[in-house]
Each structure stands twice: as structure tokens, then as C-alpha cells.
Amino acid sequence: MSTAKLSGTPFRDFLIPGLVLCSALGVVPLVVTVGAYRRRRWAWFGSVLVALALVCWVVVEGVVIGFGERLQYPNLLQAVVMLLVTRAPSVRAQFTE
């Protein structure tokens, strides 16, 4: 991938953004998924944080490299759906017992 889109940013390559993306939106959601499967109380809050992190990532990405990239809108939609699902009373009840 060309680093031309990173001009004007503090990054000269994709290493740091890639590490942040891999950990915050790769490893953490996996941990939250395992927690949700095991019905840990913290998993609900973790899923909200993951959804908010995804919204922040898409917004920052849009500001830095511009909106209109192929996966920005599906990712934003996924984050909104995650937030809506976590607000459902049946989902909240599963993690407050």
C-alpha cells in the first residue's frame, strides 16, 4: 500500500497505525467476544468501548485520508449496529444478572 496517503500525518509508514488497529480493533474485540461467550459482566461495557473505538477510528481515518474509502461506511454501520444491540434490554439483562 502506498504511503502517499500518509503525507501530512505524523506517520511515515503504516506500522504504528497498523499496530493500533490490530490491538484496539483486533485483539480487544476477540477478548470481549470470549468474555461475552462466558457471560462476564465486563463484556457488555467492553463491547460498547469497541464500538466507540471503531467510530473514532473511522472518523480519524476520514479526517486524515478523506472519507469515501471502500470500508469506512460498512465499518461505521457495524459500530452503530453494535451500539444499538448493546442498548437492547434483553442484551443488557444478560450481563447484569
Image: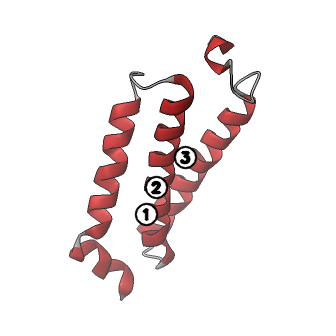
* Distance from Cα at disc 3 to Cα at disc 2: 10 Å
| Quadrant of the frame with the N terminus | top right
Q: Which residue is label 2 attached to? A: 52
Q: Amino acid at mark 2?
A: Leu
> Mark 3 against mark 2, which lies toward the viewer?
2
Q: Where, by quadrant of the figure, is residue 74 drawn?
A: top left
SS state under label 3: helix
Which of 46 and 69 lies nearest the eye of the viewer? 69
Asked if marks 1 and 2 touch (Cβ < 8 Å), the reply is yes
Q: Which residue is label 3 attached to? A: 25
Residue, far bottom: 97
Asked if marks 3 and 1 touch (Cβ < 8 Å), the reply is no
* Distance from Cα at disc 3 to Cα at disc 1: 12 Å
Q: Which residue is label 1 attached to? A: 48
Residue name at image x 74 percent, y 22 percent: 13
Which of disc 1 and disc 3 is earlier in sequence? 3
| Residue 70 relative to residue 3: left or right | left
Residue name at image x 47 percent, y 40 percent: 59
Residue name at image x 42 percent, y 22 percent: 69
